[in-house]
Image (cartoon, rainbow, N blue to C red):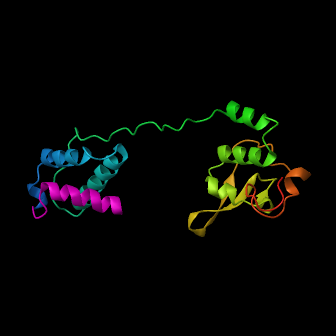
Amino acid sequence: MRNYAIGVGKTAERVGEGRPLGQVADDELGEALEALSDSTAVNTWNARRAAVLSWLAWCAERGFDGPEVPAWAKRLTPPDSETPARSNMAIDRLIARREVHLREKCFYRMLYETVARAEEILLLNIEDLDFAGRRALVKARGAQSRPAAAARPAPCWTSTPRCTERAQAGICTSSGTPV
């Protein structure tokens, strides 16, 4: 909602707030959007452009005449993330190392094979794991619980005594007995 208000508001400032929508030309709207893109990141530009498009579509649905975003004011391709993705082989090599403790192995595997955030995995308790279904109930942001499911077999998600003997505290917290 905030991006919507900012995108439409700043564009309106550029073309003139008190002007009737029907008097704004397509190219004028495109120039206003382009002027906003000079000082913003690619994702911000795309969000603001989408907000203006959405607002113009809303106006058109209600019968108001107005400009269209010109074709040359295109959606920009966001840059690739600078965070490198690790291959499954690299994760397997890390987990196979003897000096890495089981707790960390389980943590790495769960991070790379689930859609859970790191803080959700860190707060996970052993008793919350469903070994048969390869799932766990995690506490998501906003105190909503949702399942975190693994994509492929994780060696620490078995019912071995070593993994299940730790019944209190989170998997990767320093409190409680380490695995």
Drawn side of residue 143 relative to residue 89, left or right: left
Q: Which residue is drawn at 77% across and 62% down?
A: 175
Q: Is residue 130 magenta?
A: no
List x then y, in percent, for residue 173: 73, 58
What residue is at 63 percent from the left and 53 percent from the top?
Answer: 118
Residue 48 to residue 167: above or below: above
Magenta residue span: 1-19
- 78 relative position to 160: left or right: left
Q: Is residue 15 magenta?
A: yes
Chief secondary structure of the magenta span? helix
Relative to residue 117, is residue 107 drawn left or right?
A: right
The answer to whether 13 is drawn above or below residue 160 in the figure is below
Closer-to-camera residue (52/103): 103
Give the quadrant of residue 178.
bottom right
Q: Which residue lies furthest to the right in this view?
A: 161
The quadrant holding residue 27 is top left
**Residue at image point 34% right, 51% down:** 47
- The x and y percentages for residue 51 are 30, 55
Q: What x and y, as percent, mark residue 67?
A: 16, 51
Residue 127 placement: quadrant? bottom right
In front here: 75 or 163? 163
